[in-house]
Image (cartoon, rainbow, N blue to C red):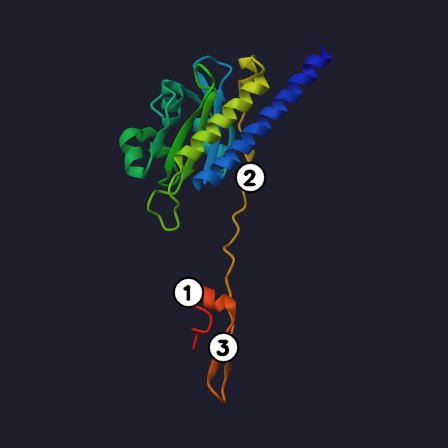
């Protein structure tokens, strides 16, 4: 019995680590602000938010536990086994007004089912800047789909055929989002001779200005 309990604890810890890694990877892949993974709840017909990155857990409390038949993008992605992508707030309001009204900001979002062989094991969800915002990168849906597929493969291997091992029955695990490094400034240098008025630039400045060597004058 003790050995069985220890295995359950190790499985739970490994499950939490897999979900945390997946949420952070999804943030990077989608240029997202918030990411989370839903798994099946211990009550049939419900999903539970298992991990959340980018926002404090209490802000998402209304969405911790949702029935799969609710008109929400995460529920449709799970029930239909298909991605649900909302490119902007207008589309979110049109298709899922209840979901859009609860968001603190006008996010775009993507919800990827996590494949489980038959029915999905859960859903990988990302909130990201609305398309067209300054600095926004195009959504790479294929990359997110591969992340969801990879997570599904790892979860099935972890469960070893026991789907109950992938049930989440507690509060979401909150994960710190990856740090965003400020862009590195590129610096070039030049010298000026006040006597001859000659100007000489180093190689980096030529590169920054798109000039061939010796063209700076």
Horizontal and vertical percent position of residue 187 = 51, 66
Along the line of sight, the residue nearer the viewer: 108 or 197: 197
The label on residue 200 is 3
Q: Name the spot of residue 167 as percent of width and height, x first.
A: 53, 18
- Between 170 and 81, the one lying in front of the other is 81
| Residue under the point 51% across and 33% down | 23
Q: Nearer the viewer, residue 208 or 70?
A: 208
Residue 126 pos. (x, y %): 43, 34
| Nearer-the-camera pick, 48 or 113 | 113
Can you say which quadrant of the picture contains the N terminus?
Answer: top right
Q: Secondary structure at mark 3?
A: strand
Left/right of residue 61 with respect to residue 9 in the rendered view: left
The reply, left or right, for residue 157 in relation to residue 77 is: right
The residue singled out by tag 2 in the image is 176
Front disc: 2 or 1:
1
Q: Residue at x 54, y 26 (%)?
A: 171
Q: Which secondary structure, mark 1?
A: loop
Residue occupying the far bottom of the picture: 195
Residue 170 makes an appearance in the image: no
Q: Position of residue 184 (x, y in %)?
A: 52, 57
Tell me which label, 2 or 1, sits earlier in the chain.
Answer: 2
The correct choice, above or below, for 184 with respect to 14 in the image is below
Q: Are marks 3 and 2 in contact (CB under 8 Å)?
A: no
**Quadrant of the image occupied by residue 210:** bottom left
The label nearer to you, 3 versus 2, is 3
Report, in whole angstroms, how far the alpha carbon at label 3 lies from the one at label 1. Answer: 15 Å
Residue at position x 28%, y 35% from top? 91
The reply to whether callout 3 and callout 1 are in contact (CB within 8 Å) is no
Q: Assess whether mark 1 and mark 2 are in contact (beta carbons under 8 angstroms).
A: no
Number of residues whose C-alpha sits closer than 10 Å to that of mark 3, classed few (under 14), some (14–19) or many (20 or more): some
């Amino acid at each position: 019995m003790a050995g069985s309990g220890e295995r359950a604890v190790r499985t739970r810890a490994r499950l939490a680590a897999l979900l945390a890694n997946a949420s952070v990877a999804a943030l990077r892949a989608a240029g997202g602000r918030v990411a989370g993974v839903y798994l099946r709840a211990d009550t049939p017909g419900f999903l539970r938010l298992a991990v959340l990155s980018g926002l404090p857990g209490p802000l998402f409390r209304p969405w911790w536990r949702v029935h799969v038949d609710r008109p929400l993008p995460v529920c449709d992605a799970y029930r239909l086994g298909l991605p649900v992508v909302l490119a902007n707030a207008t589309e979110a309001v049109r298709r899922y007004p209840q979901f859009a009204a609860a968001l603190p900001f006008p996010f775009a979002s993507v919800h990827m089912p996590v494949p489980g062989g038959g029915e999905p094991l859960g859903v990988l969800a990302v909130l990201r800047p609305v398309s067209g915002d300054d600095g926004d990168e195009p959504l790479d849906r294929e990359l997110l789909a591969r992340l969801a597929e990879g997570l599904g493969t790892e979860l099935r291997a972890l469960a070893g055929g026991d789907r109950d091992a992938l049930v989440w029955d507690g509060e979401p695990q909150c994960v710190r989002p990856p740090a965003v490094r400020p862009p590195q400034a590129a610096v070039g240098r030049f010298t000026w001779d006040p006597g001859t008025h000659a100007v000489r630039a180093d190689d980096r400045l030529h590169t920054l200005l798109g000039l061939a060597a010796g063209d700076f004058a």
